[in-house]
Structures are given as structure tokens and as C-alpha cells.
Image (cartoon, coloured by chain):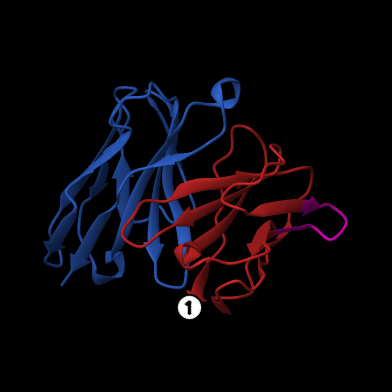
Chain colours: A red, B blue
Amino acid sequence: AQRVTQPEKLLSVFKGAPVELKCNYSYSGSPELFWYVQYSRQRLQLLLRHISRESIKGFTADLNKGETSFHLKKPFAQEEDSAMYYCAPRLSGNTPLVFGKGTRLSVIA
Amino acid sequence: NAGVTQTPKFRILKIGQSMTLQCAQDMNHNYMYWYRQDPGMGLKLIYYSVGAGITDKGEVPNGYNVSRSTTEDFPLRLELAAPSQTSVYFCASRRGEAGGNEQFFGPGTRLTVL
């Protein structure tokens, strides 16, 4: 079955520490992968997509096809990174995004 | 552009009542979606539409109906509200493959059914 897994419900790190939010997927083919973020009292917004291979707000995510993972990383966490993060694959261009259950990141000063 | 807008922001319903959650986008996007967000459960797709006049069921369609008579609007209808439908509802839209795959979200509607 096609599935996306974010194993951590809550991740707490100290300011300045590295952070890694895990995402594993089980999809046949080559899905397109996204990370969405929801800050407190705000709507969901796109953070990263794997095809762009970009760094946004210091975050990067590498698609590892062998491990079927798309972990989100940042070397030095900031308090403003505290938010809910969702990994979301799309199997093909016309299919809807499927969201993981999300990981709440809490950065402690 | 206002982007994706949703009304109302909050609503309390009694069991058995009906209501329509409104969603509109002014970006001329082909694709529109309705998700519900429950604590610890992420977002689950209720219904989606790939264009005016076309709708399809998502993962959790029971108890809901949608219509897409125009490109801009995608209302979600609850006919007989139940406590299990207490949730935050998000509408989203996307232009499509040729125009980009980013999905834009509305601010959400928080619904409580008592």
C-alpha cells in the first residue's frame, strides 16, 4: 500500500542544534515529494520540493530513492522554526498530495 | 490576488444540522481540494476536483458532498452533521502540471459539532 510515514510526532531541540525531521514513503514509481510547514495560527505553506534541490530558510531535503526517504534537515535550529511540518508525496502530476501525520518541531531557547 | 479564501472561519453546529463551507480561489487554478485536519492524524483528503464540472472522492468522503460549477468556487456540503466531523477543514488549489505543482492553502474553517 502507498504510504508516507513521519515517525516522530514531536521533536524538541535546543536553539542552535541540528535538526532532522524524518519522512519515509512507500510508493511505486517516482513520486514527487514536498515538505509543507504550518506556523502557529497560519495556513499551510510550501517549504521545499525535491525537484528544486533548493535551501529554504536554511532547510534542505534530499531524496534517497534507495531508502525511500526524504528527510528534512537544518544545521542550526532557530526559535522561529517551531511549527508543524508535513511530508507530502504526489505519485503523478494529476493525483492529489498525500500528507503524513506531521511532526511538531519545538525549538527551545 | 487574495489566493485561497474560506468562509466561515469558525462554526458550531448541532448534530443533524447542515451547512456549506465555502472555498474560492482567484488564481485560475484547475485543481481544488478539501482536506480535514485532526490532531495527530495529519491531513486527510475528502474530495477533489480537476476542473469545473469534475469532482472525485478522496480518502474520507462519507458525510460530505461537493460541487464545482465554476473554476473559482469549490463548496463543501455537510448534510447531517455528526460529532465525528468536528475538525479543521482546509481548502487548497493548484494550477496543474504545466503551471506548477505547488498547492496553495486557505486559512481553514474550524468546525465543532455538538
Task: Please identify the quarter of the rendering in which residue B31 is found.
Answer: top left
Q: Quadrant of the N terminus of chain B?
A: top left
Q: Mark 1: which secondary structure?
A: loop
Q: Residue at x 35, y 62 (%)?
A: A40
Based on the picture, tell me whether residue A68 belongs to the magenta stretch.
yes
Magenta residues (range): A63-71
Q: Is residue B87 left or right of residue A35?
A: left
Residue B71: give x, y in percent of width and height. 34, 22
Q: Is residue B67 left or right of residue B79?
A: right
Residue B97: give x, y in percent of width and height. 60, 25
Inspect the image, locate mark 1, and give the three-letter code of the amino acid beneath it: Ala
Q: Residue at x 51, y 74 (%)?
A: A107
Height in image: B113 above or below A86?
below
Height in image: B101 above or below B39?
above
Q: Residue at x 35, y 50 (%)?
A: B90
Task: Please identify the quarter of the rendering in which residue B83 is found.
Answer: bottom left
Say which of B18 and A7 sits in front.
Answer: A7
Q: Is residue B93 left or right of residue A9?
A: left
Q: Is residue A39 left or right of residue B103?
A: left
Residue B89: give x, y in percent of width and height. 32, 54
Residue B100: give x, y in percent of width and height. 56, 27
Height in image: A10 above or below A65?
below
Furthest residue toward right: A66
Residue bearing the label numbered 1: A109
Task: Please identify the quarter of the rendering in which residue B6 is found.
Answer: top left
Q: 10 Å neighbourhood of mark 1: few (<14), some, or many (≥20)?
A: few
Q: Quadrant of the C terminus of chain B?
A: bottom left
Based on the picture, tell me whether residue B58 belongs to the magenta stretch.
no
Height in image: A69 above or below A53?
below
Q: How many marks?
A: 1
For mark 1, name the chain. Answer: A
Say which of A42 and A75 sits in front.
Answer: A75
